[in-house]
Image: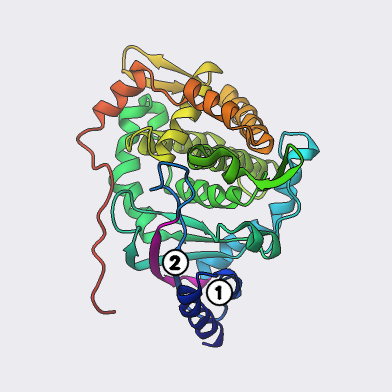
Amino acid sequence: NPSLKKFLTLRAKAFETDDYFESEMAWMDLKDTPIEVVIGPYEVYTDKLFGLKTAFESFVTIKNPEESAALDKYKNYLRDMEANLPVDEKYKNFDRGFESPIAVTYQIHGGGDNVPGVQTIAFNLPNDEAVREAKGAKKVLLNNVLGAKFDLILAPMAKEVLVPEQADMLVKKYMSFETLFHELSHSMGPGTITVDGRETTVSSELKELYSKIEEGKADVMGAYNILFMMEKGELPMSEKKAFLATYFTGLFRAMRWGTDEAHGGGAAYQYTFFKDQGAFSWDDNTKRFKLDFDKLEKAISDLTAKVVILQGNGNYDAAKSFLDEYSKLDAHAKEVIANTAHLPTDIAPIYPDKL
């Protein structure tokens, strides 16, 4: 396949030069190949000092063309979703490329930073703002990894998190959609910003706080955008409660990894913000949460606005104050998390030696 050959050749050269721009552009242009491969220095989660140093990782996946095509239509709404954000125009970002390929894949191998710790269910790459402004970013869902986590973790966890009548609402479909729109939302909102007259990026200004802020933003903005798709008639409005129950339970799946971890900390500030907005209550009889769907929907909009403005202002101290206030778990959340101790925290994939 010419496009795959071009990408791998340029990526091999990039390993020698430490300049990844051309190979990232080539990765965005992959086509007519069932093999979706990623290898390089990408995520900064392991850099606890400034959140700038990337770690090398790799994914080897096989693309499902039918499922990819079924989701591909949602990338066409990226500009509409950006315009629909509940913030002033100055915080909206129409400068990024809106070329946003979506690949539904089955992971057959992982390497580097993908191996230890929490297993990735999807990613939105590249992270280079120059590439994003020129091309956008590709969203890759790892369907077999996601499916295993729903069946083994999220579905049984709902029985510990929500009152019985709401726990039964969870559906795998909306774990997949929240994952997809989480990744789409990474491509939205402030990226390159101006602070005190100088051009910079959100990640440079928020430093080690960025990953936690950004992962929570992608979660809540993803939920906001799914609700927008329901309003547009692209997803059934009748399934709104099923989606919200699945989304809320997913916060606990992430919080079990700890609030110091980027996704866990991002989930924690969503939980606390929603609690302050009265989006759920504690049921003393069942020792479970009961969602107020109308209040949760409004809180999703309010938190989306708050985090986008926080990023757009690029104020480190304001971001730290926000996390200090909201990234803490109350006694009820800790009790529910303790009650899930019999469930696996994550999965440990075993990849085949041969296909």
Position of residue 242 relative to residue 1, above or below, is: above
The label on residue 40 is 2
In the image, 118: left or right of 41?
left
In this view, the residue farthest toward the right is 89
User: Viewer-proximal residue, 195 or 60?
Assistant: 195
Q: Is residue 292 visible?
A: no
Q: CA distance from mark 1 to mark 2?
A: 10 Å
Q: Do the residues bearing badges 1 and 2 touch, measured as CB atoms within 8 Å?
A: yes
The label on residue 107 is none
The x and y percentages for residue 221 are: 60, 40
- Range covered by the magenta-colored residues: 54-65
The x and y percentages for residue 18 are: 50, 69
Q: For the point 54% across and 41% down, which residue is it?
A: 214
Position of residue 325 relative to residue 51, above or below, is: above
In the image, 152: left or right of 278?
left
Classify residue 257 by image quadrant. Answer: top left
Position of residue 63 relative to residue 159, above or below, is: below
The x and y percentages for residue 237 are: 62, 40
Which residue position holds label 1?
23
